[in-house]
Amino acid sequence: MKTVVTPLHQAHNHEHEFEGGRLIPAKDVPARAELVLDAVRARGLGPIVQPLHFGNVPILRVHGAEFVHMLEQAWGRWVAKYGYEVREAFPSAWPAKGMRPSTEDIEAALGTYCFDTATPIVAGTWAAARQAADAALTAAQCVLKGERAAFALTRPPGHHAGADLYGGYCYLNNAAIAAQAMTDLGRRVAILDVDMHHGNGTQSIFYGRDDVLTVSIHGDPAAFYPHFAGFADETGDGAGEGFNLNLPLPSGTAWGGWAPALETALARVLDFAPDILVVPLGVDTYLGDPAGGFRLEGADFKRMGTALAKPGLPTLFTMEGGYRLDTLGPAVADVLTSFEGG
């Protein structure tokens, strides 16, 4: 299995996020990708390659042009207003109900497109997000050429980013961009998100469509981020009715409760009969993850990889969450190597 790395991910290096009304140290740090890469190398998973460059066309098949332009220009506009000494661009206000979105001022633009307080833009954010999308597209190309699986080590992650919004540490939706590119080539694609948190961005992008199946196993949004999406009654809209499946689970869920949800998810995937499976892979389901709430442990990630292999589908993995640094690399490597063994 090839691993596509994004060397520019290190340029997206911020120090802070807001959580619970407090300024806290950032969780999505460059060390995350390096720890996963070290584990992949140590296991001898397969070749390590750098991404090809695909331009903006595949991105614009998923994201709005004005949104992409804002992300590309945001840091320059921030510096023009505040100078370089303010290293992290956060929104300070959001257009709540009855208020009009605006992009004229950079703070207004950030508030218009960002939906949380944990996802700043810094000098290297656009370059890193842009290359993460290329990594997903490169991994997709591997699968399209006949390889059984490929792993896009994407940082920043992507599954919270919608067509015209960012948040949850995500700026461009890497999995959705790859899925759309494969759909454009006539492939039937299913997305199975196993991150601790609901992939609200992925759901919203495909919610009205029947050509891409979206399935997610995640913490119940009544208690977990992103709070406003991921409920079981969200099944699709219009032509997409029945092509979105959410499997929310309560806090404290361990393998005994998580595994049946995976069985249900895989049964729906097989019923859809896709040509290719895309797995946004988050391991923040690990017991003790600082952004988590589930209780999966080491051997459970091996079981997960084996189960994901059972349908026998060509599979693209993208890297999403996982913030317990001492277990992050081994957990990802356990999923991928067990998939290969399965």
Image (cartoon, rainbow, N blue to C red):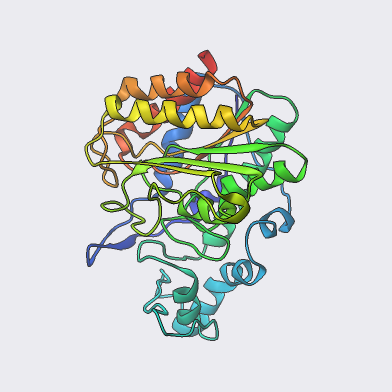
Q: Position of residue 273 (x, y in %)?
A: 63, 29
Residue pictured at 46% horizontal, 32% vertical: 265
Q: Residue at x 50, y 27 (%)?
A: 267
Residue 92 versus residue 191: which sits nearer the camera?
191
Looking at this rendering, what residue extends furthest in the right direction? 185
Q: Position of residue 146 (x, y in %)?
A: 73, 25
Relative to 65, 129 lies left or right: left
**Residue 79 shown left or right of residue 118 in the figure:** right
Residue 132 seen in render: no
Relative height, residue 176 to residue 309 (above, below): below
Quarter of the view holding residue 189:
top right
Asked whether 204 or 319 is in front, the reply is: 204
Residue 236 or residue 50, whichever sits in front: 236
Write the residue at 49% across / 28% down: 266
Can you give x and y, in whole percent of width and height, for residue 113 in the image?
50, 70
Q: Is residue 220 above or below residue 18?
A: above
Q: Residue at x 45, y 41 (%)?
A: 216
Tally the marks. Answer: 0
Task: Identify the image quadrant of residue 3.
Answer: top right
